[in-house]
């Protein structure tokens, strides 16, 4: 198994929850790329957007993805082998071709997907998500999700090695699908 596994998909698909659990199952570490960006930048995502717009955030995202994709994560386990590092990408990390190339060259990518209506419901129920991440358009939340999915779905498909539909599934069910797929490779 590769020493890196990426999770991609729109905000609200479960990348963080699944990523954390997947890393535990694989005996590895979990990195949330958005959290890594905030740590490196010393600013929140909202502050990065306010100061430099989306392009400034995407620049940070690319720099941090370069660091994460290239770092070797040695972790001693009972069998003394390198453990897997699970990286939950931000929903827009796949927008830049360079990022998709980095992902493809350093590990398998699992796309977590759901409908726009489901994502709007999940995001609306998570006060932390709304507070931490700015709107990317002037559209209503559900219309913004539908529009961004229209643009991003072909890129998720291009970046991913497998798609897991999270619609109506628990975190544990999605986790099991991911583990089963990874072990079958």
Image (tube, helix red, strand yellow):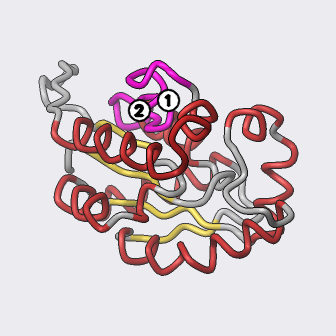
The range drawn in magenta is 25-43
Q: Is residue 34 magenta?
A: yes
- The residue at which mark 2 appears reads as 31
Q: Which residue is mark 1?
A: 35
Q: State yes or no: discs 1 and 2 in contact (Cβ < 8 Å).
A: yes
**From the image, which quarter does the C terminus lie in?**
bottom left
Q: Quadrant of residue 182?
A: bottom left
**Residue 65 horizontal/vertical position (percent):** 31, 43
- Judged left or right of residue 90, residue 60 is left
Provide the secondary structure element on which disc 2 rests: strand
In the depicted view, which residue is nearer to us: 185 or 51?
A: 51
On the picture, is 94 further left or further right than 121?
Answer: left
The answer to whether residue 9 is above or below residue 71 is: below
Q: Position of residue 93 (x, y in %)?
A: 43, 55
- Was residue 71 drawn as part of the magenta stretch in this picture? no
Q: Which mark is residue 175?
A: none
The answer to whether residue 151 is above or below residue 20 is below
* Image-based side of 73 in relation to 59, left or right: left
Taking the spot 24% from the left edge, 54% from the top edge, the residue there is 107
x, y (%) of residue 96? 35, 64
* Mark 2 crowdedness (10 Å alpha carbons): few <14, some 14-19, many ≥20: some
Q: CA distance from mark 1 to mark 2?
A: 8 Å
Circle nearer the viewer, 1 or 2:
1
């Amino acid at each position: 198994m590769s020493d890196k596994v990426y999770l991609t998909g729109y905000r609200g698909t479960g990348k963080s929850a699944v990523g954390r659990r997947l890393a535990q199952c694989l005996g590895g570490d979990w990195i949330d790329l958005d959290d890594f960006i905030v740590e490196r930048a010393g600013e929140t995502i909202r502050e990065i957007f306010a100061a430099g717009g989306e392009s400034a955030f995407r620049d940070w995202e690319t720099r941090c993805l370069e660091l994460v994709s290239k770092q070797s994560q040695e972790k001693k386990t009972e069998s003394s082998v390198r453990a897997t590092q699970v990286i939950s990408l931000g929903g827009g990390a796949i927008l830049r071709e360079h990022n998709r190339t980095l992902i493809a060259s350093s590990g398998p990518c699992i796309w977590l997907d759901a409908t726009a209506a489901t994502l709007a419901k999940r995001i609306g129920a998570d006060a932390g998500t709304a507070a931490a991440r700015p709107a990317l358009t002037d559209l209503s939340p559900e219309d913004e999700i539908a529009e961004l999915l229209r643009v991003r779905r072909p890129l998720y498909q291009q970046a991913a090695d497998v798609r897991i539909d999270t619609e109506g599934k628990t975190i544990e069910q999605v986790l099991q699908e991911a583990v089963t797929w990874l072990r079958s490779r």
